[in-house]
Image (cartoon, rainbow, N blue to C red):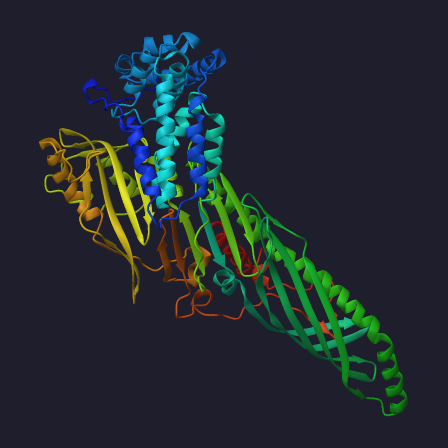
Amino acid sequence: MHTVFLPSPTIGAVVRAATAACRISALALTAAVAVAQVPGEQTDPVFERLARDAAVAEGSFRAPGESVLDSAAAGLRSAMGPLDRLLERSRSGADWRKFLDWPVLVEQASSGMAADPKVLRRLEKQLNATETGLDMPQFVAVRKAVTRYAEAADAARGSGGVTRFSRRLDDLASALLSASATGQADMLADVPPILERLAESGQATGLVAGIRGALARPNIELEVGEGLVAPLVNRPIDQVQPVDDVVLGTRIRGSGRTTGSVRLDFVPAPDRAVFDLVLDATNISETRGTQGPVTVRSRGVTALGARRRVALDGENVSAAPVEASASTDSQTTGMSISSRFGRRIIQRIASKKIAETRPRAEAVAESKARDRVRQQFAEQTEPALAQIRQQLRDRLRGPLESRGLYPEMVHLHTTDTSLRVVARKSAAGQLAAHSAPPAALTGNLITARVHESAVNNILEEKLGGRVFTKADVERIAKENNATLPDSLDNEADDKPWSVTFAKHRPVTVAAGDGRVKLMVRGDKFVSGDRAFEGMDIWATYRIESTPWGQRLVRDGDVQIYPPGFKPGGVEKLTMKETSLRRILQKRFDKLFKSEIEIPDLEPKGELAAGGPLPMNQLTARRDGWVVAGWRKADRIVGHGGSVVPGTIIHERVIDGIPLGPGEEIVHPSAAHGDPAAEAAVSAVVTAFTGG
């Protein structure tokens, strides 16, 4: 049997019980109301209404019934199964079972309505410890199930259920009023866990749904201008081909020249991204045909057109049939007769015959040209579309879904000049944006509007409760061909270290008026053989514009304090906390650099020819929105570094009539899908998907 090794737990390192949620509600609410009444502050009526709803809901407490407890117990038993199998394979499984008090856990999971809230809270505390290994998915699932069970049992049988419910509603109202008064999204940080606890205990379901609905607006918006991808798709056509064929019994020789362009057009669509690949070309032929003693010189002009509509809905790429058109006009430019006798009669008969057959010849020419352009343009674009479908699955949606990063909601639409992706990243129990994003500057080729909730939600999913060691960071850097920052690598004593991230909001971004605050919350730090309790580490950057672009400038030093500690207050740091501050300060002063220059955006893959793109806009708004925009560089770079005329259509036209079956329309290099066309369509969808 394969053995899994898990670190043995030590009881002494169990995390202190969380007390931040037990603040004195009356003082918090009073402070929030005072802020809300400051003259000149803009309040949010939605938050004020929700805060009033929270106050009204205080009398709605209802003890959960037996079905709620049975459901919570079943959820715990289901979560314990994978953990039980993991511990069976682990050499330290017995230690973990002892640490978790496994027999008691099994007993409680079978108790239903008879569950003991105090015992469940004790088990919850064990599972919330900072022991290495508790961040594994099997442990996390059991921890969440125990919390849900404890909440339901507390509400059903605990003596403090009503008091706890009332305190949570007070804290909820306080946070909502603070957000209303200040307009700062960060004031809502305490709301998600409160809502989750209320939902777990089955309380105030209408209030919980109302708040989640009000804070569930899209928190990611990406806009890509047609000008970014169109230059990669738009290209000229200029090709001269010899003509040698027999048409209506007459041998025809000469040359034809096809000129025109292929271009990209965005199509306005409210429910998906739509664009057209369009061919506009003209073939002009100069030919001579000989039959008997008569040689006729002709000039044919055929207008060729093709259009294929491609749609992207975030899950699939679809393409409509190619629409093709052809319009031919031909004229005789000269005639010679080699016979010595009857020249005038022959010329008269030949001229009449040409005039009689011209309409039919032009109609046949137009029909054949349409069919062949339609067929070849479809063949030319189909391999590219198949490649894009694969890229959506293998390079975008698949990897993001496997990492849990794919947004819960994605909506695409196009205008006549841009593609817009609107998304919401918020898992169950998380909140999204509560306001619309700021406007973009005119001239942006790419605009990214990201609400702080999107970043914070992703980081909480990926880092919450996780333990990272120096070895982990070195491995990740190696896998990504990156080098470790000096703050993490160049240690004189080279001591091993580890960080246990907080389970709630482990790393956060908070936007303000022209500022961005970055915070790291650690539940436990280890340096060498010394272990330290958690610290909050943060730095605030102001956004500055320079003649060379945008940059972030740190305001003062990196701040490092225990959770809930108020600098300048009565409380003082302990010697151990002061020692940890010195250790962390050395690292994070280098990690949070005093100035961060923002480099130009370097598009990858098919879009690389359109870069680099200098940043044109960087703004942060107090409601949590950060807007970044990139414009076209002053120098213009074409496909592959310069605009090289390419040939999409090769057409031989004789007196307005295309040659018969077997004649090539598409350049031989595109026999298996024209590379230029593949790159063109792929570039569009790559830009759409951010891939």
Residue positioned 58% across, 61% down in the render: 265
Q: Quadrant of the N terminus?
A: top left
* Percent coordinates x, y for residue 558 in the rendering: 19, 46
* Percent coordinates x, y for residue 536 in the rendering: 23, 37
So how many labels did they put on this image? 0
Position of 598 with respect to 607 (left or right) is left
Residue positioned 69% across, 77% down in the render: 285
Q: Looking at this view, is 59 or 89 the one in front?
A: 59
Q: Is residue 248 visible?
A: no
**Rendering quarter of residue 471:** top left
Position of 141 with respect to 14 (left or right) is right
Q: Is residue 473 visible?
A: yes
544 relative to 285, above or below: above
507 relative to 418, above or below: above
* Percent coordinates x, y for residue 385 in the rendering: 57, 51
12 relative to 33, above or below: above
Position of 297 with respect to 182 (left or right) is right
635 relative to 463, above or below: below
* Percent coordinates x, y for residue 329 in the rendering: 75, 76
**Rendering quarter of residue 640:** bottom left
Q: Looking at this view, is 442 or 491 the one in front?
A: 442
